[in-house]
Image: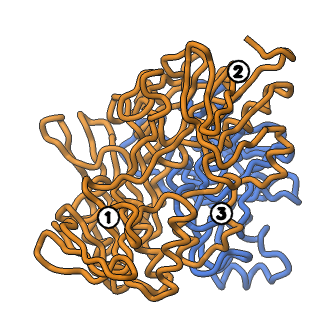
Chain colours: A blue, B orange
């Protein structure tokens, strides 16, 4: 089980996770050049949460795929491009099936999916879904490895919607237990 | 009461998103049951939402299918394709097919979907007059485009909009006949619609607002022109009606409680014992409207199908509640609409609107609670907004088992 768990209250907005994500997806390319070219888009995004909240309100929002056990993006996907790899504990995107309809962006309660142009293997003409792939080869995702505050955790336990239900918070999930 | 062999007998009427999701859910829990799937169309399940990318030429026909014959075999479902369910008797627990066969059931799923709706008096059946619901409809549109026939889209809701985009991609920007004063009148306000409309205008789409079809000119080859209520004539060889869909309730009528669709609770149970429903035919509780509505969208169909299938097989699952929502890529301009988009002051509604260039963001609040959103140009926060709409709502939480 991979999965990524997030505690936004611990995020200090250092954005080391974004750098690690881009570097982890550089492949054979020179990481520095890959970063400078701006094409190595990050799959995790840290944004300021806005002011006005109480002391409990997190200061930063962490938009990254939690690899939910019962993912609403998989239900919503009109072309079955999103699929659950239960064995690996990952929600995968088969880019070649994605028609870029924005439904996944509308469904994900964590704001973890973006649509990007020019993904390898994408259908011609439109954008396609782009999100955290869980760093399958690394075992523990790069962002989790570098997070200095413990805002990101993962490996061993599933996160996302199913876990949210167990905590009794924002239970958005339906389906089989 | 199980059949003679002791295995539970499941009948699923309908072979699209909801029916297929139910089949998969049943098999996840019940290995021994007999599952029969009744499919009116003589082909494996396909995604109706992908018909517009198919018309646009972005997808080959094979890519539309959600399951192949192998998958039905793996799931050990008996697929009866090309036959329709003609009658239902809930007291005898039987479904009669139009070829005379009778299927007894222990658990039945009505996933009969919906049919394209046409205004009264539309000469459906005339060559060149059709809806967009099936693969045949989509093939006919592709053929008309290939033969360079001019296409008119009647109706500018989400389906009409996606068809319009597909026709532009296929190099045949259509005329769009809109009954309201702006496009997307059910899912967007005038300002958001104007941005979308102006964007489509740049691709050569012509809009006829506040207009309806009044008459038509028929030639040897079928449709030649439409007459509009504003007195103008619209030459076209194909008119595609995208005026919404009507839930296919005929089978259920008189046997289970029906409204606009088939009424269900959050376990997708109808008023009759052992009868479930899911998908475009189901009338489910809507978390924003606070009443039962038919929310005929893909995410509903899949989630409801799975909930129904799980409960049919003896599991316990609940649907989290409907929320009307639509997302579209309007030729590079993203568009999302969710929940209530009209501001009615008498309901205690107000709206927060931000607009910069082609980016538009409207949040609708009802007594301080977020109940709807329209986003154009930048839809990245749509998922979080949907979660926020559902969050304070009792129905957003799972019912405790």
Categorize mark 2 by other alpha carbons within 10 Å: few (<14), some (14-19), many (20+): some
The picture quadrant where one finds residue A31 is bottom right
Considering the numbered disc 3 on the image, is that residue within a helix, a strand or a loop? Answer: helix
CA–CA distance between discs 2 and 1? 41 Å
Q: Which mark is residue B315?
A: 2
Position of the C terminus of chain A by quadrant: top right
CA–CA distance between discs 1 and 3? 24 Å
Categorize mark 3 by other alpha carbons within 10 Å: few (<14), some (14-19), many (20+): many
Instruction: List x then y, in percent, for residue B106.
Output: 69, 18
Considering the numbered disc 2 on the image, is that residue within a helix, a strand or a loop? Answer: loop
The picture quadrant where one finds residue B395 is top left
Q: Nearer the viewer, mark 2 or mark 1?
A: 1
Q: In which chain is the residue bearing label 3?
A: B
What residue is pinned by disc 3?
B64
The picture quadrant where one finds residue A172 is top right
Categorize mark 1 by other alpha carbons within 10 Å: few (<14), some (14-19), many (20+): many
Please check whether the numbered discs 2 and 1 fall on a single chain.
yes
Q: In which chain is the residue bearing label 2?
A: B
Considering the numbered disc 1 on the image, is that residue within a helix, a strand or a loop? Answer: loop
* Above or below B283: residue B228: below
Q: Which mark is residue B156?
A: 1
Instruction: List x then y, in percent, for residue B128.
Output: 39, 73
Instruction: List x then y, in percent, for residue B111.
Output: 57, 37
* Above or below B81: residue B47: below
In the displayed structure, does residue B400 sit left or right of residue B262? right
In the displayed structure, does residue B267 sit left or right of residue B126? right
Instruction: List x then y, in percent, for residue A94.
Output: 73, 63
Instruction: Please report whichever mark, 2 or 3, sits nearer to the chain's N-terminal start.
Output: 3
């Amino acid at each position: 089980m991979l999965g990524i768990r997030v505690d936004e209250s611990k995020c200090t907005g250092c954005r080391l996770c974004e750098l690690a994500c881009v570097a982890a997806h550089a492949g054979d390319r020179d990481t520095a050049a890959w970063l400078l070219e701006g094409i190595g888009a990050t799959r995790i995004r840290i944004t300021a949460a806005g002011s006005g909240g109480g002391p409990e309100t997190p200061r930063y929002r962490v938009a990254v795929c939690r690899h939910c056990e019962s993912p609403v993006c998989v239900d919503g996907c009109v072309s079955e491009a999103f699929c659950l790899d239960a064995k690996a504990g990952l929600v995968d995107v088969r880019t070649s099936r994605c028609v870029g309809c924005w439904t996944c962006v509308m469904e994900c309660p964590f704001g973890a999916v973006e649509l990007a142009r020019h993904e390898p293997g994408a259908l011609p003409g439109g954008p396609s879904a782009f999100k955290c792939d869980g760093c399958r080869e690394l075992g523990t995702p790069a962002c989790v490895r570098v997070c200095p505050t413990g805002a990101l955790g993962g490996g061993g336990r599933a996160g996302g919607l199913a876990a949210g239900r167990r905590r009794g918070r924002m239970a958005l999930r339906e389906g089989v237990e | 009461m199980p059949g003679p062999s002791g295995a539970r007998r499941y009948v699923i009427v309908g072979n699209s998103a909801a029916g297929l999701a139910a089949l998969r859910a049943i098999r996840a829990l019940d290995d021994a049951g007999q599952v029969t799937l009744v499919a009116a169309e003589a082909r494996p399940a396909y995604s109706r939402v992908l018909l517009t990318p198919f018309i646009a030429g972005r997808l080959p026909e094979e890519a539309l299918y959600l399951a192949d014959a192998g998958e039905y075999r793996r799931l050990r479902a008996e697929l009866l394709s090309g036959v329709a369910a003609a009658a239902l008797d809930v007291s005898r627990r039987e479904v009669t097919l139009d070829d005379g066969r009778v299927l007894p059931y222990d658990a039945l799923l009505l996933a009969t979907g919906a049919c394209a709706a046409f205004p009264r008096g539309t000469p459906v059946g005339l060559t060149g007059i059709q809806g967009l619901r099936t693969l045949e409809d989509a093939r006919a549109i592709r053929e008309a485009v290939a033969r360079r026939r001019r296409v008119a889209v009647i109706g500018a809701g989400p389906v009409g909009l996606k068809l319009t985009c597909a026709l532009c991609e296929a190099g045949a920007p259509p005329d769009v006949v809109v009954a309201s004063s702006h496009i997307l009148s059910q899912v967007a306000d005038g300002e958001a619609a104007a941005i979308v409309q102006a964007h489509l205008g740049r691709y050569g789409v012509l809009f006829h607002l506040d207009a309806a079809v009044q008459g038509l000119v028929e030639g040897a080859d079928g449709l030649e022109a439409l007459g509009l209520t504003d007195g103008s004539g619209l030459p076209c060889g194909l008119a595609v009606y995208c005026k919404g869909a009507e839930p296919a309730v005929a089978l259920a009528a008189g046997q289970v409680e029906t409204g606009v669709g088939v009424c269900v609770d959050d376990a997708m149970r109808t008023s009759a014992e052992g009868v479930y429903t899911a998908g475009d035919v189901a009338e489910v509780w809507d978390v924003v409207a606070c009443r039962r509505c038919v929310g005929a969208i893909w995410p509903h169909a899949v989630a409801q199908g799975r909930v129904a299938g799980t409960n049919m097989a003896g599991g316990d699952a609940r649907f989290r509640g409907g929320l009307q929502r639509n997302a579209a890529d309007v030729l590079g301009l993203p568009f999302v609409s969710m929940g209530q988009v009209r501001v009615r002051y008498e309901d205690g509604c107000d709206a927060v609107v931000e607009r910069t260039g082609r980016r538009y963001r409207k949040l609708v609040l009802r007594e301080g609670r977020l109940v709807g959103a329209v986003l154009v140009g930048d839809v990245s926060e749509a998922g979080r907004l949907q979660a926020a709409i559902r969050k304070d709502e009792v129905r957003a939480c799972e019912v405790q088992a």
